[in-house]
Amino acid sequence: MTQQLQDEFDSSVENAEAWMKAIQERLRINDNTKGPRSALEARLRETEKIRALEPEGSLKMDLILVKADAALRSISEDKKHEVLSKLKDIKALWEETAIYITHCHSRIEWVWLHWSEYLKAQDEFYTWIHNMRVTLEPDIELQLGLKEKQWQLSHAQVLQNDVLNQSVLLERLLEEAASLFSRIGDPSVNEDAQKKMRVEYEGIKQEAQNRVKLLEMITKEHEQYSASVNQFQSWLNGVTERLNCCLGEETKSSAEVKLKALKEIAKDIRSGGKKWKHLENQCAEVIQNTSPLGSARLKDELEELRKALEKLKLLSSEEEERLLKIQQSESAYESRARQLEADIQKLRKDLQRLENDLDPGEGEKTEDEFVTLWRKCNATRAALAAEESKIERLKAQLKELLRFSQDVQPHAESVVSAIHQYQSVRGKTSKMSTDTETQLRRLIQNPLQSFEQWKPSVQMLLETPEPELAHIEAALAESSQFKEKLMTLPLKKDLLNNVLGEERAESFLQEVAEASKEREILHKSLLQSKSKLQNLILLHKNFDAGFAPLQKKLSAIKAKLDLEKEPQPDLLGKKTQLQRLQMIQDDLAELAVHMEEVEKLVQSNTTHRHEMNQLSSDIQALKRSLEMMIQQSEDHVQKHWVYNDKLSDLQQWISVTREKIDSCQDADGEQNTEGRLEDLERLLAEFPDKEIQLHLVEAHGQLVMENSSPEETAHVQAELDQLKESWKSLKEMATGLLKEWQSNRPVADKKKRAFVDSRWMSRPAFHLLDVNPSHKQEKMGEGQSTSSHLKLLHDFEEWLRGENTELTKILAGTPSSTEQIKAQQSKLEELQSRVPHGQHLFEDLLHLHPVIGNSEDLEDLRYRWMLYKSKLRESVASPVGSSMFLRKYSEKRSGGVCSYLHRVCRAALPLQMLLLLLLLLTFLLPLAEETHSCTLANNFARSFKLMLRYERPPPT
C-alpha cells in the first residue's frame, strides 16, 4: 500500500513536470514582439490560450499536494526527505511557469496596446493635416470693414498658433514611432515615415505664416485710414462745439465778442477743406482691399464728412445776421423792467404793515379778548382781498418781459417772492381767525363735553358688583360741580349767538338741558348705591364672625397632624396612631361641612370669595397629606405584623427542634441510636429552609426599624440578636450530636456515613459541618457567602418589586395633555437610569449562584428581571400608546410551560441568526474570486494615454 501511494505521487509529479515544460516551450516560441501587426495579434491570442490553461496547472498542483500528503503519512522517515524535495522542486517549477505565463502575456499585450494607440494618434494627425490644408487653400476674402478684417486676422493667427502647437504633438508622435520601431521593427514606423510627417507639417506651417503677414498689411492700412477719419471727426466736433457756444442763448458775451469768434471759426472751416482732400486719397487705397459693400460704406462716410463741413459754413453766416437783431431789442427791455421792480416794492410795504397789525400777544386770554382778536382777523382778511388786483397786474407785466430775448429770471423771482409773501400773510390771517373761533367754541362747550366724558365712568362705577364707598362719595361731589356749570350756560345766550350762530346756539342749549336731566338721574343712582354699600359693610362683619372659628379649627387639626409624624415605639403604638389619624380625618370632614355653611354668607363679595378659596385649598392640601400619612401608617402596621408573625413562627420552630434534639439525647440503646440518627437527619434537612427564613426575618426587621422610634429599633435589634444566638446554639448542638453519633457507629457503616456526609456537604447552609478540622475555616467562609447571597437575593427582589410597582403606577395614568406626557416620559427615563444599578445587583447574584447550585427561584427572578426591562424599554419607546398593553404583561406570573418556552426561544434565536450569516458568506465567496483576472490586474492598459510617456521596459 505504501509503495502504491509513492508511485502515484511520482506519476503525478512527472505528468505535471511534463505539462509545465510543454507550456514553457509554447511561451518561448511566442515570446517575441518583432514583426507585423497580424503576427503580434496571433501571439497575443496564443498567450491568452496558454493563460487560460493556468487553472489546469493549479489543479495538477493540488493533486500533487494530495498525493504527497497521503504518501508522507504512510512512508518512513528516511524517504520523506525525497518526497519533500520533489514537492519543493515541482512547486518552484510551477511558480516559475505561472510567472512566465503572466509576464509573457503582459509584454505582448502592452506592445499591442502601444501600437494601437500610436496608429490612432497617427490617424488623428493626418486628419488634422487634411483639415488645415482645406482651410488654408482658398484665397483671402475681401472683408466689409475694419472690424471684420481684424477678425479675419485674429482667425488666421489662431490657425497659425494651432499649427505651432501641433509641433509639440508631432515631436511626441515621432518619439513614439521611434520607440515603437525599436520594439517591432515594422516599416510603417521607420525613419522615412517619420520624415514624411515632418515635411507635410512644415508645408502647412509656411502657408499659415504667409497668410498672416498679408492680412496684417491689409489691416494696418485700414487702421491708418480709420485713425485719420477719427482725427478729422474730432476736429469737426471741436469747430462745431465752438460754433454752438456762439449760437447758444445761455452765453453772456456781448454781440461784438460773438462776431469776432465767428470770423475765427470761418477761417478754420476753410482749412478743413484741405484735410478732407487728403482723406479722399487714403480712402481710394483702402477700397482696393475691401468688399464692394464695404467700399460703398467708406464712400458714404466720406460724403457725410463733406456735408457736415458745408453745414458749418452755412450756420456761421446765419449767426452773424442774428446778432444784429439782438442789439435792437435790448433798450426796450430795460425800461419795462424798471417799472416792474417799483410796483413790487410798493406791494411788499403794504403787506408788511397788515402783518404787523395781527400780533396776538402772549399769555392767557379772557373770553372778551378772544372776541376782539377774532374781529380784527376778519378786517385783515377783507384788506387782503383788495390787494389781490395788484398781484394780477404784476403777472401781466412779467408776461410782457417774456417776449424779449433777455434773461427775465431775476424779475420772475421778485414777482414770485411777492406772491409768496401775499399768500403767507393771507394764510396766517386765516389760521389765526380759525384758531380764535375754535378757542371760543371750546370755552363755551367745555362744561358739556366734560360731563359727557364723566358720565361713562359713573355708569361703569354703578355697574361694578362691589364698588368702594369712597369712589361713590367722590362721584357725588363731582355731580354737584357739574350742576353749577350747566346752570350758568343759558345765561350766555347773546355770546352764543355771536360765536355759534342762532341755530347752532339753540341746539346747544337744548343739549345742555338734556345733560342736566341725565345728571339728576345719575345723582339719584349714586345715592342708592351708597346706601347699598353701607348695608354690605354690616354683612361683612357677620362673615368675619363665622370665618375666624374655621381658621382656628384648621390650625388645631394641622397641629394634631404634626404631632403624629413622630415614629411609634411598638406595634400597639402604630395601631393607636392609625386610629388617631382616622379620627383627624373625621374632624376634617366635619370642618368641610362647616365651611359650606359659611360660604352661603359670601354672596358676591370678591374678597370673601378669595379667602374662602384659599381656605378650601388649604383643606384639600391637608386632606391629601392626611391620606398619605394614613396609607404610610397602614403600611408600617402591616410590615410590623408580618415581622412579628414570621419571628414567632421561627422562634416556635427553634424551641420545638431543641426539645426534639433533647429527647434524642435522653434515649438509650443501639437500636434507638439508629432511629435517633434518622430523626436527627430529618431535622437537619429542615435547616437550609429555616436559615432562609431567618434571613427573611432579618430583612423584615430592618424594614420595621426604618419606620420605628429609637427605643423600638433597639428592641427589634435585641430580638434579632437573641434569635441569631438561639439559631447558632441550636446548630452547634445538632452538629456536635451528629459528630458524636457518627464516631460511635461501627466501621461497617462507613459507606453510609460517607453518603450522609456528602449529602450534608451539598446543602448550602451546612458547608461548615465538614468532619475534617483542616477545612473548617474554608467551610465557614462558604457559609458566610451563602448568607450574603440570600441577603442579596432578598434585596434584589424588594428593589425589583418597588421598581415594577412604580412602573405600573406610571403606566396606569392616561395623560391628556402635552405636559402630562412629558412628565410621564421623564419618570420613565428616571426608571431607565436605574436599570444599570439593578443589572449590577443581578450580576452579583449570578457570581454567588454556584455556592447554592441550581435554584428555581433564581430562574424565576431572572425571568421577572428580563420582563421588567422589556416593559420599561417598550414604555420609553411608546409611553402613551402601549400603557394598557404593558399593564397586562405586568400581571403575568413566571414558571410553568410558558416560562420554559420563553427561555428556549431566547436561546435559539442567536444560533439561527448565526447560521443564516454563515449561509450568506458561502454565497459571497465565488464573487470574491472574480477580482483575480488578468484583465483587471493589468491596470496600466486601462490608464494608457498617448500624452503619457513611459521610457522604461515593459513590466516583468
Image (cartoon, rainbow, N blue to C red):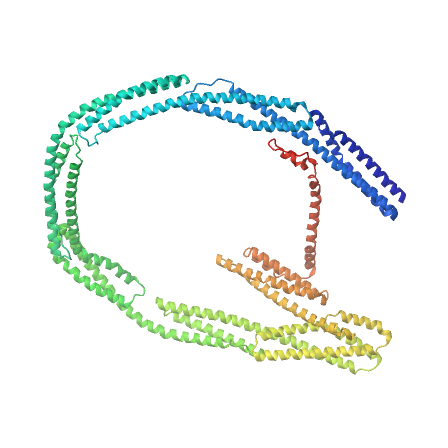
**Residue 168 visible in image:** yes
Q: Is residue 839 found left or right of 165 in the rendered image? A: right
- Residue 872 appears in which quarter of the rendering? bottom right
Q: Is residue 622 found left or right of 18 in the rendered image? A: left
- Residue 226 appears in which quarter of the rendering? top left
| Quadrant of the drawing holding the C terminus | top right
Residue at horizontal 69 percent and vertical 55 percent from the top: 905
Q: Which percent across, then down, holds residue 80?
A: 86, 46
Judge by depth and name the residue closer to the eye, 381 or 502.
Answer: 381
Residue 670 against residue 128 in the figure, above or below: below
Q: Which percent across, then down, holds residue 653?
A: 70, 77
Q: Is residue 238 found left or right of 495 in the rendered image? A: right
Residue 148 against residue 938 in the figure, above or below: above
Judge by depth and name the residue closer to the eye, 316 or 633.
Answer: 316
Judge by depth and name the residue closer to the eye, 847 or 502.
Answer: 847
**Residue 686 visible in image:** no
Q: Which percent across, then down, holds residue 954?
A: 68, 34
Q: Which percent across, then down, holds residue 283?
A: 36, 18
Residue at horizontal 68 percent and vertical 53 percent from the top: 910
Judge by depth and name the residue closer to the eye, 444 or 635.
Answer: 444
| Quadrant of the drawing holding the N terminus | top right
